[in-house]
Image (cartoon, rainbow, N blue to C red):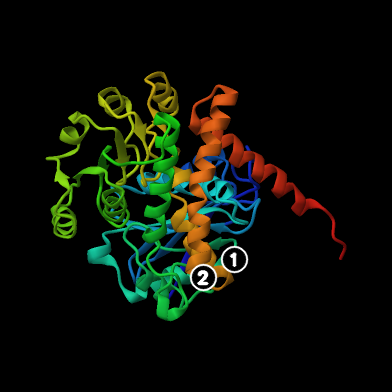
Amino acid sequence: MTTVTNVFASFPHGSNTPGDQQEAGAPGHPQGAVTPALTAASHAGHEQIVFCQDAQTGLRAIIAIYSTALGPGLGGTRFYPYPSEDAALADVLNLSRAMAYKNSLAGLDLGGGKAVIIGDPVRDKSEALLRAYGRFVQSLGGRYVTACDMGTYSEDMDIVARECRYVTGRTVPNGGAGDSSVLTALGVFQGMRAAAEHAWGDASLEGRVVGVEGVGKVGHRLAGHLLEAGARVVICDVNSDTIRRTVAKHPEVEVAAGRDDLLARPLDIYSPCALGGALNDDSVARLSARIVCGGANNQLAHPGIEKILADRDILYAPDYLVNAGGVIQVADELAGFNFERARARADQIFATTRKIFALAGEEGVPPAVAADRLAERRMAEVGRLRGIWLGS
């Protein structure tokens, strides 16, 4: 197998100079050339972006490392049929940045990274492709630690691990934590309870109407927690199979015809658990919910949405804060997985969410801004300690 790595960007966190430490002579990119990827990276403030390609297996992947201030960049691998390489690059840049903030707020000694594989996981995934991908992750020497995400599963990580030491989210028989959606859903539930307490003075969700958009890995588990807590749950999903599976397991859920139908209903809480960008100008204008709290990454479609939510008196629980249960679960594998220890840490999302809402009130900013500030403060304060000279 022949592998070709195109390293288009590799420069210090926060650098504004495209091309610093650029890989010389990358195929198709003469030495010193500034590629679109480099320009995007400089604007995003990433430390490193790696384009990976193996023609024989059909692998086309991008690994983005946003920050290693707190430790190696940990984040999942998303396998998705992006319409273009530009779309894949935009997604991996957003996701890797969110992972840095998520890991910081979760109190983990880990930085932020993410990877995307371009393709249809049903049609294109193979052992050879996953092992080729593992070779690229291994080549980064531990700067990036991978795990599961949309389109990848614990069984896939076992295959990646046959070529790479820097893998979490593995199956239980192989010493892993298994499905990370277990604690992701729990963390969203805890964040929702904290939001309810802040909005209504009581953390109970009994009798509240919660609209869950997307009932895949995380959404269907979240629906279960909500029903146990006495909430009324309305669901929607573009995939009819996931709707059928959720209804079969929880026949008491109501099914909306689609996103428009869900948003038109009188909801207490809106929970986006599908793809990012769910909160845009149109959807926020139509929202009746008092609270937004869900498992999807990058829910805010563009800067300024957080202020529109605040102006409408809609309480937004920052996505990377409340959906951190999954990364807490897979990160625990690095010390030898213990579910009770990981669950106790995921339960702390309730207290952290409460802290963010209090900080937002004190500083007169939306919760999303308060969360960013707290995450950045920890990255700066703890990251600085790595510069203290310990001798040779």
Q: Which mark is residue 338?
A: 2
Q: Is residue 122 above or below residue 316?
A: below
The image shows residue 323 at horizontal and vertical percentages of 43, 49
Q: Is residue 318 left or right of 332 when viewed as pictured?
A: left
Instruction: Name the residue that disc number 1 marks.
Output: 142
Q: Quadrant of the C terminus?
A: bottom right
Amino acid found under the numbered disc labelled 2: Asn
Q: Is residue 197 left or right of residue 150?
A: right
Query: In x, y percent, where is residue 128?
Result: 35, 75
Q: Are marks 2 and 1 in contact (CB under 8 Å)?
A: no
Residue 277 image point, x, y percent: 34, 37
- How packed is label 2: few (under 14 Cα within 10 Å), some, or many (20 or more)? few
In what element is the residue under mark 1?
Answer: loop
Q: Secondary structure at mark 2?
A: loop
Q: Is residue 229 left or right of residue 356?
A: left
329 to the left or right of 151: right
Q: Earlier in the sequence, mark 2 or mark 1?
A: 1
Q: Name the one closer to the observer, 342 or 303.
A: 342
Is residue 46 positioned above or below 184 on the image?
A: above
The x and y percentages for residue 117 are 37, 59
Residue 284 lies in quadrant: top left
